[in-house]
């Protein structure tokens, strides 16, 4: 499967724990985007990363959320000290170059905070 | 501040008829518009796009129309098929290569056999 791979598909955490969501982009893609979909809402932009660089993090909450896309390995979205309001579907998308609006999405990680 | 709006949360259409999904945007700097389709438990998949220099783009049963003066675009599906039942997201991005893609809230389309 050469598409965007996200894992885990489902993640259950208790309040105060850390959640780490992983995304492996399409092979050869160097641009990664994270979106969040809350229940009954659309896709909200969170962060746009290029290898080893954060290009735009304007959609990221100021606290507890961080993202990285290292030179080697998957992109990681980390949520520290999760709260119930963090429960959502988190989608990762990748593109091969700048200015390519056609994004390839993964199947998402459903985060449930108990 | 929602820059991309889809005012109809849901739409039901008979199989074989035309489905028209509407989208409005507020940011005049948007330069490129896209439609994505999403099935439950899956990620969105790209469907069709249009540049701001065009007013129509067609791909098989799918046609997107853009009215820049009204800041409005629509997706037409004809004929509609039961397999088209999904959530459709309108999306837009700006002129620079660093502009993120902004999505609307989606419209859930049900095509009734």
Image: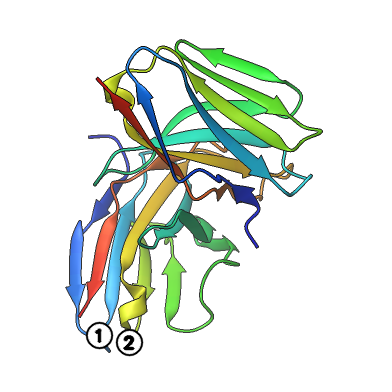
User: Nearest the camera: B91 or A25?
Assistant: B91
Q: Chain of mark 2?
A: A
Task: Evaluate if marks 1 and 2 touch, with contact meaning CB atoms under 8 Å apart.
Answer: yes
Residue B27's tag is none
Marks 1 and 2 sit apart, C-alpha to C-alpha, by 5 Å
Same chain letter for marks 1 and 2: yes
Give the percent coordinates (x, y) of residue B54: 73, 21
Q: Which residue is mark 1?
A: A17
Quadrant assignment, res A11 = bottom left
Query: Is the residue marked by circle 1 packed among few (<14), some (14-19), or many (20+) residues within 10 Å?
Result: few
List the residue tagged with mark 2.
Answer: A81
Q: Picture coordinates of residue A13 (x, y %)? A: 20, 78
Q: In the rendering, at what x and y percent does residue B30 appear?
A: 72, 42
B104 above or below B31?
A: below
- The image quadrant of residue A17 is bottom left
Along the polypeptide, which appears first: circle 1 or circle 2? Answer: 1
| Residue A42 visible at all | yes
Left/right placement of residue B97 relative to residue B107 reads right
Q: Residue at position x 49%, y 84% from top?
A: A63
């Amino acid at each position: 499967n050469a598409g965007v791979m996200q894992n885990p598909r489902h993640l259950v955490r208790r309040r105060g724990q850390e959640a780490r969501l992983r995304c492996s982009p399409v092979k050869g893609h160097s641009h990664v985007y994270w979106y969040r979909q809350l229940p009954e809402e659309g896709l909200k932009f969170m962060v746009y990363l290029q290898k080893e660089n954060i290009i735009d993090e304007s959609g990221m909450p100021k606290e507890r959320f961080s993202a990285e896309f290292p030179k080697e390995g998957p992109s990681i979205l980390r949520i520290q000290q999760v709260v119930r309001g963090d429960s959502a579907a988190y989608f990762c998308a990748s593109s091969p170059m700048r200015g390519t609006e056609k994004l390839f999405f993964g199947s998402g990680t459903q985060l449930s905070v108990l | 501040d929602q820059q991309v709006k889809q005012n109809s949360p849901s739409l039901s259409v008979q199989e074989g008829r035309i489905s028209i999904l509407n989208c409005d945007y507020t940011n005049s700097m948007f330069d490129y518009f896209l439609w994505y389709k999403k099935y439950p438990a899956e990620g969105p998949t790209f469907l069709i796009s249009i540049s701001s220099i065009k007013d129509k783009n067609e791909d098989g049963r799918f046609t997107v129309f853009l009215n820049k003066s009204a800041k409005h675009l629509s997706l037409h599906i004809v004929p509609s098929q039961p397999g088209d039942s999904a959530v459709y997201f309108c999306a837009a991005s700006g002129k620079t290569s660093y502009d993120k893609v902004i999505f609307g809230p989606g419209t859930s389309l049900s095509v009734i056999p």
